[in-house]
Image (cartoon, helix red, strand yellow):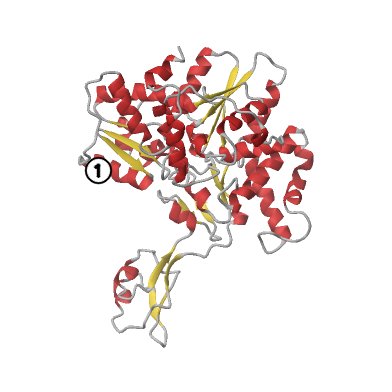
Amino acid sequence: MRKFDTKVQHLKYKVLREVAKQAWADTLQENLLDIPKIIVPGKVPTMRCCVYKERAMLVERVKMAMGGNKQNPNVIEVIDIACDECPMGGYEVTNACRGCLAHRCEDVCKFGAISFDEDHVAHIDKTKCRECGQCSKVCPYSAIHNYKRPCETACKVKAIKMGEEKEACIDNSRCISCGACVYACPFGAITDKSYILNVIDMLKGSHGNKDYKIYAVVAPSVSSQFKYAKLGQVVTGIHKLGFHTVIEAALGADLVAMSEAKELSEKGFLTSSCCPAFVSYTEKYFPELTQFISHNLSPMAAIAKYVKEHEKNCKIVFIGPCTAKKAEIQKEDVKPYVDSVLTFEELQALFDSREIDITSLEESDLDNASYFGRIFARSGGLSDAVAEAVREQNLEFVLQSCTCDGIEQCKAALLQKKAGRLQANFIEGMACVGGCIGGAGCLTHGEKNKAEVDKYGREALEKTIADAIAVLK
């Protein structure tokens, strides 16, 4: 079974794997320039026009695998040299233009960008065009089409622009670190910084130190990943990497559900705080609504906080599908609890860098959280969990949830709330379509992942949220 959806993901993985291999062996600095040659041996290019350009791009990918530009606070960056194959984009006249007499496109253009040749076919002057789209709207033949780059189409917050050399550029003031552009770019020219070296340093430092323990907090969406192996084998593999304990982030979701239900019943209206990209979106685009953001930490941070309060000399590494989690751990209220973040892509690279074949391992248990904590991984799961928490705590409150599946639905709900027209008292915001199972750091994406999460939830030993939390006490 294929481990990844796309060849772009596979290329990223190969770079991460080689960087990790050298880091384990303490030979990274001396062998740094050899990594591109390992991935593309010989003189035959596999993806680009020549092997030298291909290797030059791989050098930049290696830098991203080592943490990227330290001066750039954003966890998402563009590899400029790799961003050169997309068309300029924008509005263009197609061969559907019939050279009609009406010239509505010319009349509606306020910038004088439309002209006609001797055959009366329309042309757009890119130096004058302001991308307003009015010509496209009035064309009776739908002959004017807006060609957007995949990254621009994927970015629902319009944080992607074109630079002077027509390369993609990210406006950090608008970016919410969701990683939609990372998954959408067919050339892998946009990627997330990796903290894989930080994690390896932690794991190496813990060897032989009995007082120093590293905990892996694993997102419930893991149930839809690593489909070539069993979940219990993935857990054993994490232990073999050197992690002392593997904990479900879903247990943190149980904590959050109980607390969020109380806060909601007291305040009467909330927007969720579980998805860092949604929280960032609200803060940047709807600052007047930030007062409604739940004061609860995310499930990742909630369970990490609990562990650090009860265990001395420990470090926490979150493992999940989310690039925005890498931004979340930079926040002042989360930084003390979570030390680093790995995506599922990076976990796969770690396994293979240590030549750990998880399919050959015995299974280990991962069975503390409730059904409701585990279904946080998919859209609608958080609302179901909060409703259950209201019921279990006998709160006199009727939940009316607005479940937002993707940032466009989040925008619609927040606009309605701003206008006073939202018929709900709780907004569940998930920036990725499908919820966490659609995160940019997933190995695989798809509707089947929702069924896997629900199945994983039904396998929970703890049938209520209260039962799951009681395990902690």
Say whether residue 104 is left or right of residue 169.
left
Question: What residue is pinned by disc 1?
Answer: 416
How many numbered discs, if any?
1
The picture places residue 170, in percent across and down from the top left corner, at 50, 49
Say whether residue 465 is left or right of residue 6.
left
Disc 1 crowd rating (10 Å Cα; few below 14, some 14-19, many 20+) is some
Residue 425 in sight? yes
Q: Looking at the image, is 414 positioned above or below residue 333? A: below
The picture places residue 392, in percent across and down from the top left corner, at 31, 20
Say whether residue 98 is left or right of residue 163.
left
Residue 79 in sight? no
Secondary structure, mark 1, is helix
On-image quarter of the C terminus? top left
Question: What residue is rendered at 52% in x and 55% in y?
Answer: 168
Question: What residue is rendered at 58% in x and 60% in y?
Answer: 84
The picture places residue 69, in percent across and down from the top left corner, at 60, 42
Question: What residue is rendered at 43% in x and 73% in y?
Answer: 125
Which quadrant would residue 429 be assigned to in this image? top left
